[in-house]
Image (cartoon, coloured by chain):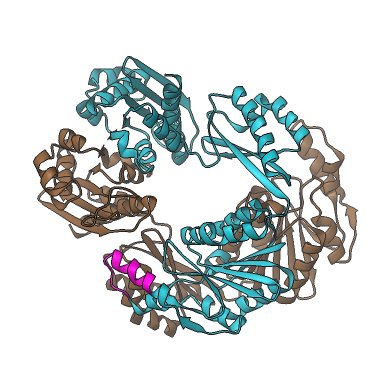
Chain colours: A cyan, B brown
Amino acid sequence: MNCEVISIGDELLIGQTVNTNASWIGMQLNLIGFDVNYGVVIPDDKSAILNALKISSERSDLVVVTGGLGPTKDDITKHTLCEFFQTTLELNHEIEDDIITYFSARGLPILQTNRDQALLPKNCKILNNSKGTASGMWFDKEQTVFISLPGVPYEMKAIMLEEVLPNLRSSNSNASQLINKTVKTHGMGESFLAEIIKDWEEGLSDDKIKLAYLPSPGIVKLRLTISGSKKERLNQKLDYHIDKLKALIPKQIFGLEKDTMEAVVGNLLIEASSTVSTAESCTGGSVAKLLTSISGSSAYFNGSVVTYSNKSKEELLNVDSMLIEKEGAVSQKVVEKMAKQVRNIFHSDFGVSTSGIAGPGGGSIEKPVGTVWIAVASKNKVVSKKLNLGYSRERNIHVSALSALNLLRLELVNN
Amino acid sequence: MNCEVISIGDELLIGQTVNTNASWIGMQLNLIGFDVNYGVVIPDDKSAILNALKISSERSDLVVVTGGLGPTKDDITKHTLCEFFQTTLELNHEIEDDIITYFSARGLPILQTNRDQALLPKNCKILNNSKGTASGMWFDKEQTVFISLPGVPYEMKAIMLEEVLPNLRSSNSNASQLINKTVKTHGMGESFLAEIIKDWEEGLSDDKIKLAYLPSPGIVKLRLTISGSKKERLNQKLDYHIDKLKALIPKQIFGLEKDTMEAVVGNLLIEASSTVSTAESCTGGSVAKLLTSISGSSAYFNGSVVTYSNKSKEELLNVDSMLIEKEGAVSQKVVEKMAKQVRNIFHSDFGVSTSGIAGPGGGSIEKPVGTVWIAVASKNKVVSKKLNLGYSRERNIHVSALSALNLLRLELVNN
């Protein structure tokens, strides 16, 4: 099965937007065993679209087209598709009703341009968009399947996940399968990790498993890939090696697949019937933001104080001004006091705190940019840790927040 | 001048690597007035490369090819280029010396695969790589220029900046230029915006300016594009229309080009020598996180409380429990009280607050998911606003945080 991804949009060609849609679609198709052989980016221009569709129909079995389906004038894809597939637009009453519901649910008036999104090509199968008003379209033309999706990433992803992939997967069920499993680690850089798991990595070749290191700030993902025809057997092999890895680096592994640190910590808090609150300085609310990104987090997250100034550390958290003066705001004693106090103020089982120098300003020889203290207080105990991070503000804030959650995770796991 | 960017690499097609190279090259070419009309991604495969080169030579004047020039076996580009340009490889002694110097300077042994990088096509102009050992190549074939570059981003960028762009710039000094300006708006969906600025949009055609709507959660960017030969005159035309737009939707426009809401608000606070603190419920720390993402924000950000539970609203913000019971936590009165109180607690000039139902749980018929109240308190005044957002938790949190900052921005601009 030869697949091709066509991305429509001037903004992609001039580099104003990075083409993450094409990467994501390529990854999804690859995961269900489809070969992606071509990626094409073209401008919002009728002849360019027609030309690309023509070339793709000659060389590909499946063509996914994104972009150009919004309500405004600069979108010309739908009319061009009609020309290519020799059809016309007709009003789809079901979709029109959905659009009306979408707008009235938000208390917004409906414009003609919104209604026009229910005008769809006659000879296509309509793909439902659960996140917006631009429907996806599925065309069969001779031996090629064409799928047209909006360019807005979360709408495109919703239609792919809910409509396109399940359909493609069932049509491709007899082919050799590619199975990936991903192990997520925190707290150790890529090269250190590679050194520690060297022998384990060598053992993977016995089962023809490929390993990829996928580092991002604060997290290294390890992706194991295996292919073959018997799904169950392949999964067993992957699980066997993942179990061995877990024994090797138990502190570093916080989850599998799509697990996030904040979801893992949230589940552990629910299991322990415990609550948490945070006192943040350098992370500026990022720990709270991560925790509350999880739906249902109000069951365990009581609240947070972001004490950016020393005065607020004194007034809101009752940290002694003498202590701050003597030790500095970025110090073990201050961060431990912050954790204890925020636990008390919010009547929580756990208090989590951060204090550090996110940069780029504020560093000294003794405490350079990237020096961060984190702490977790529970009923009878306070644990704390010093991090030495780098020079990027964004990265320092993010990695500090992740590290604070991991410290809480280890407390929850060990108790 | 029609330009095309060809990216070679399996990792791009299966989404393991996002194609940032193509975006960067597109942006650089666009900045010096070249139109990028096609982007193509193909696998490390001889026939795919030959086929793409053939198509590009028929439709483009300039073709930039990246990828496939490293020392390992999977790179086949160089041999394929020789076939396409009907030439053979020859050892370039100057480049060989550079490679030897490169390795000995790093105290590394030289492998044959490294030496082989000095084997280069006879009929190309060699482009020096100051950051690595894979040279770039410049081919002239009939009316088309082909440039082949390594795929490693910092090597590719070095050759582009040091060798390719200066050359192209001088060859294109009389050609027409393409200039983009982007206006960033908040608070109005794409279709409403289009309706309100319809007449203005029609007026753009007088100056041959193209308009594109680029929506993302909470923000619609409007990109204006003009081309011609006199840069100053083109900029004047764009500025003229942007000024008219500003008069039309003054509340919605928060910035231009790379401006972010949080940076714009930060600058306004600095100009006004004012400070801010936030009391967040449904946004869970996101407003604080946005504000503190800006380096130097400690000059105006005093701190935040995230009062997720009703109890914490009462205890930390002194919101009367009777008021919460009567009006509900998601109400105008409660959110206004929160803003006033957090302004007092942190001794700030402005207090910003949010309270809403982020979802997916917690909604009712009266207050469905996506109902959010935001408020801004200043010395003698409190303003508040009700938002009706959608069903996605992540989006609701993000758009609420942006809206709260925009409400603060409008207060800062109007005072």
Asked whether residue B37 is in view, the answer is no
- The residue nearer to you, when weighing B89 against A77, is A77
Q: Is residue A353 above or below residue B92?
A: above
Query: Vertical placement of B112 versus A400: above or below?
Result: below
Name which residue lies at 86% across and 46% down: B116
Magenta region includes residue A105: yes
B314 vs B86: above or below = above
Residue A172 in percent (x, y) is at 68, 58
Residue A209 magenta-drawn? no
Asked whether B375 or A221 is in front, the reply is: A221
Locate residue A29 relative to residue A374 in the image: left or right.
right
Q: Nearer the viewer, residue A124 or A407?
A: A124
**Total numbered circles:** 0
* Magenta-drawn segment: A97-110
Find residue A240 and report its image quarter: top right
The x and y percentages for residue A350 are 33, 25
A403 over B409 or under it: above or below: above
Main secondary-structure element of the magenta-colored stretch: helix
